Image (tube, rainbow, N blue to C red):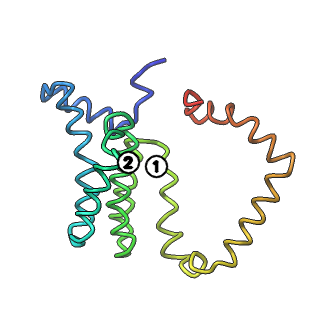
């Protein structure tokens, strides 16, 4: 296994930039921890009353501990949180630029590509409980089918193909 191929390109270039700047490993961790915190608080800058509760819950629930371990995922979440502003403002290019930035740090962020159309083009669908209940019933029925059960039992193989098999 080549470790360089196992890292998303955005994270790889962030590591290279840190090496170029001769940052110690602690400096790299500070930079990578700062990115999602910055985006989280930046999106809430106009909602100052929320910030004090966010800081309190951030510290009391020890969420900050995950900023040292699952850092690639947390950076991607930071980009996604900031992109939500552009969903509301219907600025599709800015939203997708941030989502593609998130994908550069964690490939699984690709599922976030669906958020803009789901929110802005299917608002009636999301706000209507009936289609959601129908989907719930359908998914419960599908869970009982042997075809779906065979897919679930072969999930490890599917994950290996996608590159995430080492998580299992």
Q: Position of residue 2 (x, y in %)?
A: 44, 19
Question: Foreground residue, 54 or 101?
Answer: 54
Name the outermost residue toward the right. Answer: 146
Q: Quadrant of residue 94?
A: bottom left
Residue closer to the observer: 76 or 168: 168
Q: Give whichever of 97, 141 is nearer the camera.
A: 141
State if disc 1 and disc 2 touch (CB < 8 Å): yes
Dot 2: element: helix
Give the vertical position of 76 relative to 32 (above or below): below
Residue depicted at 51% across the width and 69% down the height: 117
Which numbered disc covers residue 63? none
Judged from the image, the secondary structure of the residue bearing numbered disc 1 is helix
Which residue lies under the disc numbered 2?
76
Mark 2: few, some, or many residues within 10 Å (few <14, many ≥20)? many
- 59 relative to 84 in the view: left or right: left
Residue at (37, 65) in percent of width and height: 84
Where is the C terminus found, in terms of image quarters?
top right
How far is disc 2 from disc 1 in space, using C-alphas? 7 Å
Q: In the rendered structure, which disc, 2 or 1, sits on the residue that comes first in sequence?
A: 2
**Residue under label 1:** 109
Q: In this view, does 83 lie to the left or right of 34?
A: right
In the rendered view, does 153 fall on the left or right side of 46?
A: right
Residue 8: x and y in percent read 40, 36
Residue that extends furthest to the front in the rendered view of this protein: 60
Residue occupying the point 30% across, 43% down: 64
């Amino acid at each position: 296994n080549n470790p360089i191929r196992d890292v998303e390109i955005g994270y790889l270039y962030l590591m290279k930039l840190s090496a170029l700047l001769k940052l110690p490993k602690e400096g790299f961790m500070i930079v990578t921890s700062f990115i999602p915190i910055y985006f989280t608080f930046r999106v809430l800058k106009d909602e100052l009353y929320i910030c004090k509760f966010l800081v309190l819950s951030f510290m009391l629930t020890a969420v900050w501990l995950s900023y040292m371990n699952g850092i690639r995922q947390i950076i991607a979440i930071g980009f996604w949180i900031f992109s939500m502003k552009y969903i509301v403002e219907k600025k599709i290019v800015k939203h997708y630029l941030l989502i593609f930035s998130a994908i550069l740090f964690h490939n699984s962020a690709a599922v976030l590509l669906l958020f803009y159309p789901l929110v802005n083009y299917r608002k009636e669908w999301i706000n209507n409980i009936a289609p959601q209940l129908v989907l719930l019933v359908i998914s419960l029925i599908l869970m009982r089918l042997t075809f779906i059960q065979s897919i679930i039992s072969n999930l490890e193989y599917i994950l290996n193909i996608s590159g995430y098999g080492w998580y299992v």
